[in-house]
Image (cartoon, helix red, strand yellow):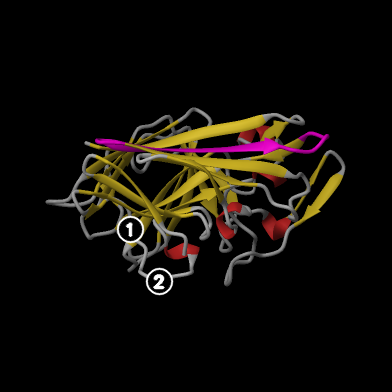
Amino acid sequence: MARDTLQAGDLRLAFDPDLGGAILSLTHEGEDLLRPTPDGTTDVLETACFPLVPYANRIADGRFTFAGRTAALSRNMAGQAHPLHGDGWRAVWQVEAKGADFVTLVFEPAATEWPWRYRARQTFRLTPDGSTFEVSVLNAVDTPGPFGVGFHPYFPHSATARLTARTTGLWQSSADLLPTELVAAAPWADGAPVRSDRLVDHCHTGWTGPARIDLGPGRPSLEVTASPELGWLHVFAPPAEDFFCVEPVSHAPNALNMIDPAAHGMRVLSPGEMLSAWMRIDLM
């Protein structure tokens, strides 16, 4: 792996451009703030955080129609009925610029099933008290196309980990994890344990941040904020795993197959137009 590191004060970040442009670890004084990547792994799903581009979460059967053009995407994850999370997390990224406390990575696929060619960019920046992650996607063809972005951070789990986040709604899901019904619910508004004996995998609407993550007694508390483009918060917590995910994203799952994709966050980019967003993780 092309592993490299950034540092600012006691905050340290490791990343690997070759492994989906993923973050491998984020530590403060040696303590993990994100779930660390096992040594030697080649599985991006075992990393600490990866980018979601040119869309987030699932597209039903990998098919949708936009402006009379039908897309057909292949499944890209074993055991999943629908393709998810785009191309970026499965790609090799290139280092465009790097300093002691920042790096910019770029990805421009030569060939992709996504019908609109694009250029993607990530920047990781550290300060002594926090980290900022930026992602952007640019429409590189001469016709308008739909795009989305997001982040997929993994936090270390414990029996006492808690999440606090104010949202306005929650998408109920089908057995194959596609959204079925939007209900008025804010299960994390007053703070609640993340641990459950059943799968938690829901997209929450109306999130304006911040989200507070308490990793447990004697562990750090974190504040997650994001740019206005990331108004959906996906919470993923499999039972009995050592991680949970709190994912700021720009649209709902399967938004491209909803009656009004734009109302559910999909952005139509004109030729040469860019969608940019950021997420920040701060120590509290």
Q: Residue at 70% across / 35% down in the picture? A: 260
Percent position of residue 253, x then y: 59, 48
Q: Which residue is mark 1?
A: 35
Assess disc 2: are there few (<14), some (14-19) or many (≥20) residues with their C-alpha within 10 Å of its C-alpha. few
**Circle 2 sits in a helix, a strand or a loop, which is it?**
loop
254 sits left or right of 5 in the view: right
| Residue situated in front as seen by the camera: 232 or 192 | 232
Residue furthest left as drawn: 218
Percent position of residue 154, x then y: 38, 54
- Can residue 230 be seen here? The reply is no
Magenta highlight range: 127-144
- Residue 134 included in the magenta stretch of the image: yes
Q: Amino acid at mark 1?
A: Arg
Q: Quadrant of residue 256?
A: top right
- Can residue 22 be seen here? The reply is yes
Q: Which residue is mark 2?
A: 40
| Residue situated in front as seen by the camera: 6 or 82 | 6
Task: Using the image, determine if residue 85 lies above or below residue 104.
Answer: below
Q: Amino acid at mark 2?
A: Gly
Percent position of residue 11, x then y: 26, 44
| Residue situated in front as seen by the camera: 250 or 206 | 250
Q: Residue at 48% across / 68% down in the picture? A: 43
Q: Do residues under tags 2 and 1 come within 8 Å of each other at their CB atoms?
A: no
Q: Quadrant of residue 157?
A: bottom left
Q: Quadrant of residue 252?
A: top right
- Residue 123 included in the magenta stretch of the image: no
71 sits left or right of 17 in the view: right
